[in-house]
Amino acid sequence: MKQYIEQNKERFFEELFSLLRIPSISAKADHKPDMYACAERISELLMEAGADSAGLWETGGNPVVFGQKMTDPSLPTVLIYGHYDVQPPEPLEKWRTDPFEPVLGPDPATGEDAIWGRGANDDKGQLFMHIKAFEFLVRSGQLRHNVKFMFEGEEEIGSPSLPAWIKAHRKMLAADICLVSDTTMISESVPSINCGMRGLSYLEVKVTGPNKDLHSGHYGGAVANPIQVLSEMIAKLFDADGRVAVPGFYDKVVELSRAERKMLARAPFDEKEYKDFLGVRELRGEKGYTPLERTGIRPCLDVCGIWGGYTGEGAKTVLPSEAHAKISMRLVPNQRSAEITKLFAKHFKSLAPKSVRVEVKPCEGGDGFLIPISSSAYKAASRAITEVYGIEPVPSRGGGSIAVLAEVQKILGIDPLLLGFGLERDTIHSPNESYLLKQFFRGMESIALFYKYWNK
């Protein structure tokens, strides 16, 4: 594979850049034509790589790209999942380069070559690795599996259309494992395989006071200010130990044993380096757990956005009619997104004084999942990464969410294997997203070796 990469890397860049130039932003309705353009381009790349068939399938939202290569029905089948939609690039002024004009250049901090642009890592760069590893196996005559590709265009908005599409095409999608590269490793020197991810409940809350904005001099001090009330309600969502104070929130959380926590603690963690990277002087979170445990094996609640009143330039002395917030709850296996959403809504409304009205609107959600490290797929992935990196990977738990993977596990009856090659330095979802070139190439090598070593 190394030789194949070296011989074809310029073509790989051209092809990947053709995807990165398409602003396939699922969160913005005016980018609908871009979603189709990106899906069409991926379909073309699959056919050029050696798929028997590839095309766009309509859903209730953006199209799914489905392609396949059926080598022999008796052979194991791998289903590749990825997503071609990307996060909005804002704030644009924070980018060093045009987010949709990809470039290959050095990292200012390390000097290492990286691909820069929105989607370079999440997830166009990582799904592209699978297409090229597949291409290599087909052209070298080494493919000994059936391979199916399922690339969606709504992951960044919670995959609202995909579960129904999967249910409707269950037979077509039948496979033995779902291989996913949409996550990160601990570091280049400590490769890891993600054995699970947290679920998600994401909501928007609205607090309404008076029926219109009021003059703060005429009414301030006599009428409840929705922004202040909302702030007070949010503060009551946590106890003194940093735990979420929603009744029933922890009822189904499974506590890990001391041995399990010890195994996960194999991952190296330098608190000073962590704080320096984030530019913070102190960490906080649930008492009794390490930072890695708080982001991997424990649930949490965060306010992701809050607004109300006048926020423009200069002064405008108004007491606002409304205040809003977006709230994210990351959930661990056994917690159910729909159940937690209901618990939160009931509790949050109970915190409101009679002076305001409260609305809670669910936005997106999904359950978490775990896979066993004793599986043949995990062992094959571990062997492949060990060969490429020269060190055995550490099993880890991801703090993020790919909500639809729990649905894949439930509907198709197969486990997702998270073989991600991103790094924290890639700043996905933020300005200046990038993907280290050596990780991009190592990913292709590792994926190709996975096929060599995996047999159900």
Image (spheres, rainbow, N blue to C red):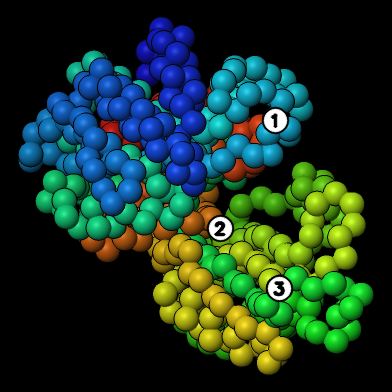
Q: Is residue 454 above or below residue 394?
A: above
Residue 26 on image: x %, y %: 45, 43
Q: Is residue 196 visible?
A: no
Kindly identify the amino acid type of the residue bearing the numbered disc 3.
Lys
Mark 1, residue position: 95
- Identify the residue shown where x is 36% and y is 56%: 160
Classify residue 138 by image quadrant. top left
Eye-nearest disc, 3 or 2? 3
Residue 38 on image: x %, y %: 38, 29
Mark 2, residue position: 399
Of marks 3 and 2, which one's residue comes earlier in the chain? 3
Q: Is 390 displayed left or right of 79 in the figure?
A: right
Q: Is residue 218 visible?
A: yes
Of marks 3 and 1, which one's residue comes earlier in the chain? 1
Mark 3, residue position: 212
Kindly identify the amino acid type of the residue bearing the numbered disc 2.
Gly
Kindly identify the amino acid type of the residue bearing the numbered disc 1.
Trp
